């Protein structure tokens, strides 16, 4: 986990706390979350809407809208620099340069009245001392790197002339133009069709390998996680409930929520399965963050919950082999099938 | 499952949209949204319709309900051709076909209570009024797993999953024989998705109606459907029993689609995209087989002639020259 910070660690987040002040009270969108990302490593953050996965990313980027939100605790260390201590100008120097982020909907993150090439050169002009000729050449090179056909022509085009997949490629080109140490991808393929999704994911993983970038992949899709990540964090109601290597997580999920998520996913490969076989469902719904139960937030939906779960929040504990789970009954799950 | 006579029979459905441009709004092109689609849905059967955005699956759904007027083709419901019917003649048929939309936030009137929303169709069709309507609505609420005391609540007071339950209750209120589900779970979280899919399956078991189930998520379609049709650029390229289609996909596009789904098993690492490039524009679809621009098996013939949907095994139809008795894509 985070105790051993090696040379390789790109990002180290410790006890991050982000809260939002709203009319209906204060809620903890991110509550005591710690993780680290190494060079060339992919860390997936999984969870359902409202679990705090996006706010975690925005907190790292220092992009949480204030008001109503604020990072109130913890530390975010990128390549040895504490980002939470920087002023806005210094932070701006880091964003797009050392950390980049790509979002779900490429159309809303691209400027519709600027040519694709100009949008990429903008990053370079801000962070690198290059002539405009050099930046344009670099922009075209980046478009080629993300495998956009005819990059010279595409650089001259506007976002609306590109398809959804192309736009996301352009976003990736922009994000990687300055060779950041860390790339955060927030649901990068959710808005895309499945064949395009496969192309984009393969591209991100490929580029990350060649460039050695650390990657945080935020997604709700366990399939995407299994195919891309090395380590996984599962979040529920603002808290990290489980962390493990991807193989370990899928083979032996320790938290009942992770188990529930896996069981509730219909599998494509269900040849033998009866047509109208029911899916295993997680009863109830994600609790509102303004009104969390006193103990474990998942207890009201958990079939294994005992009295202790409803009274005390379980600490995150190691359950063997770099596998952490926040569940009072996690150790019993080790043996369970 | 399949009855002797299908409940819904769609023959050669075509829907073209005009693209207009210039000051005179002259027709400058045509979107071939649906380009000759035929299929049938049996009683109590679920037909899944999969395809990527822009393939025309939602247009098919809406045409079936005559929410959009098809350009040509025939739609038979229970043996009656409903394509030429007037609005008034259509009305009695509307009772037997209902739709559930993707976005339960957009398809519920925010100023009506949940009870009124579900009860409205009963009033419109003169089936129940006043107390009887209230009782019927309460019954419907129970069927979809909502409490009767939630009838007086407004849509914003419900979660996404619950809102979709309201939409389902509304669709059920008239006792339909066909429910068209247009991406009913795409907007929901995974854990809630499973609840809604289970509900749909349970309701079908109880009431024996048919679903035309449209989704882009293969896993969801695979789970709920009996038969699956795969669409690409306005045409059905393959249609088969579910287990047959997933075990033995014949069309290169179906194969690519299946291979693109990320499997939730880290040992099955195989993120190798099987198709390059994007879906071509339906305004100017490629000649011949529309998939030939992305197909790894494309031959000269594919560029020139459009393959028809032909039998390739029991109940398995494919539109691909490779399957035209000469061989198959492996």
Image (cartoon, helix red, strand yellow):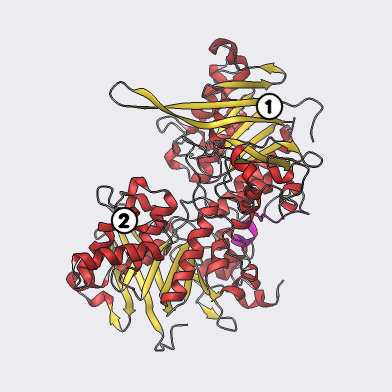
Crowding at dot 1, Cα within 10 Å, few <14 / some 14-19 / many 20+, comes out as many
Residue labelled with disc 2: A155
Residue A58, x across and y down, in percent = 34, 64
In terms of secondary structure, what is the magenta stretch mainly?
Answer: loop
Tag count? 2
> In the rendered image of this protein, does residue B181 appear above or below residue B295?
above
Can residue B164 be seen? yes
Q: Nearer the viewer, residue A147 or A327?
A: A147
Q: Chain of mark 1?
A: B
**Is A118 left, or right, of B245 in this rendering?**
left
**Left or right placement of residue B62 versus residue A14 in this view:** right
Report whether residue B228 is seen. Answer: no
Quarter of the figure with the C terminus of chain A: bottom right
Q: Which mark is residue B64?
A: none
Asked which secondary structure carries label 1, the reply is: loop
Q: Is residue A333 magenta?
A: no
Q: Residue at x 75, y 51 (%)?
A: B248
Horizontal placement of A45 versus B247: left or right?
left
Direction front: furthest residue: B300
Give the magenta part as a residue range: A260-273
Q: Nearer the viewer, residue B238 or A227?
A: B238
Task: Name the quadrant containing residue A216.
Answer: bottom left
Residue underneath mark 1 = B177
């Amino acid at each position: 986990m985070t105790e051993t910070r090696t040379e390789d660690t790109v990002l180290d987040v410790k006890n991050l706390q982000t809260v939002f002040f709203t009319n209906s009270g204060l809620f903890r969108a991110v509550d005591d979350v710690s993780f680290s990302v190494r060079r060339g490593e992919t860390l997936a953050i999984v969870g359902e809407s409202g679990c705090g996965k996006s706010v975690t990313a925005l907190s790292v980027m220092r992009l949480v809208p204030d008001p109503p939100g604020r990072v109130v605790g913890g530390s975010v260390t990128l390549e040895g620099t504490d980002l939470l201590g920087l002023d806005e100008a210094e932070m701006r120097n880091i964003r797009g340069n050392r950390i980049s982020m790509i979002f779900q909907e490429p159309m809303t993150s691209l400027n519709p009245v600027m040519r694709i090439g100009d949008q990429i050169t903008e990053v370079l002009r801000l962070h690198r001392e290059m002539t405009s000729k050099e930046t344009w050449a670099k922009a075209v090179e980046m478009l080629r790197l993300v495998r956009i056909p005819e990059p010279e022509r595409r650089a001259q085009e506007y976002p609306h002339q590109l398809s959804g997949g192309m736009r996301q490629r352009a976003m990736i080109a922009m994000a990687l133009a300055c060779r950041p140490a860390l790339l955060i991808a927030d649901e990068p393929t959710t808005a895309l069709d499945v064949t395009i999704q496969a192309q984009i994911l393969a591209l991100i993983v490929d580029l990350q390998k060649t460039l050695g970038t650390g990657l945080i992949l935020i997604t709700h899709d366990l399939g995407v996680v299994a195919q891309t990540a090395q380590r996984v964090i599962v979040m529920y109601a603002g808290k990290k409930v489980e962390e493990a290597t991807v193989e370990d997580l899928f083979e032996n999920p320790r938290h009942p929520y992770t188990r529930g998520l896996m069981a509730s996913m219909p599998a494509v490969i269900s040849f033998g399965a009866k047509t109208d076989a029911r899916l295993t469902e997680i009863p109830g719904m994600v609790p509102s963050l303004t009104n969390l139960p006193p103990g474990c937030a998942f207890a009201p939906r958990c079939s294994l919950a005992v009295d202790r779960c409803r009274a005390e929040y379980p600490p995150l504990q190691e359950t063997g082999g770099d596998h952490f789970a926040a569940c009072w009954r996690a150790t019993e799950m080790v043996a369970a099938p | 499952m399949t009855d002797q006579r299908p409940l819904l029979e769609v023959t050669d459905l075509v829907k073209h949209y005009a693209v207009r441009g210039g000051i005179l709004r002259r027709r400058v092109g045509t979107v071939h949204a649906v380009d000759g689609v035929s299929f049938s849905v049996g009683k109590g059967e679920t037909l899944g319709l999969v395809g990527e955005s822009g393939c025309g699956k939602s247009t098919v759904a809406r045409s079936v309900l005559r929410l959009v007027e098809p350009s040509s083709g025939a739609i038979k419901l229970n043996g009656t051709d409903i394509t030429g019917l007037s609005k008034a003649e259509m009305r009695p048929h509307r009772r037997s076909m209902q739709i559930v939309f993707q976005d339960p936030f957009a398809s519920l009137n925010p100023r009506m209570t949940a009870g009124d929303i579900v009860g409205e169709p009963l009033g419109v069709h003169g089936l129940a009024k006043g107390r009887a309507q209230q009782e019927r609505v309460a019954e419907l609420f129970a069927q979809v797993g909502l409490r009767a005391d939630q009838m007086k609540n407004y849509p914003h007071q419900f979660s996404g999953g619950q809102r979709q339950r309201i939409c389902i209750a509304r669709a059920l209120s008239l006792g339909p024989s066909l429910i068209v589900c247009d991406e009913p779970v795409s907007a929901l979280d995974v854990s809630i998705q499973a609840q809604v899919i289970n509900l749909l399956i349970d309701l079908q078991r109880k009431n024996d109606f048919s679903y035309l189930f449209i989704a882009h998520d293969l896993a969801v379609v695979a789970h709920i459907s009996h038969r699956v049709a795969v669409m690409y650029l306005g045409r059905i390229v393959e249609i088969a029993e579910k287990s047959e289609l997933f075990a033995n996909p014949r069309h290169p596009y179906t194969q690519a689609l299946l291979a693109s789904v990320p499997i939730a098993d880290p040992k099955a690492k195989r993120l190798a995209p099987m198709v390059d490039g994007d879906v071509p524009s339906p305004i100017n679809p490629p000649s011949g087989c529309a998939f030939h621009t992305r197909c790894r098996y494309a031959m000269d013939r594919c560029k020139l002639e459009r393959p028809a949907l032909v039998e390739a095994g029991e109940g398995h139809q494919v539109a691909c020259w490779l399957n035209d008795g000469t061989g198959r894509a492996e």
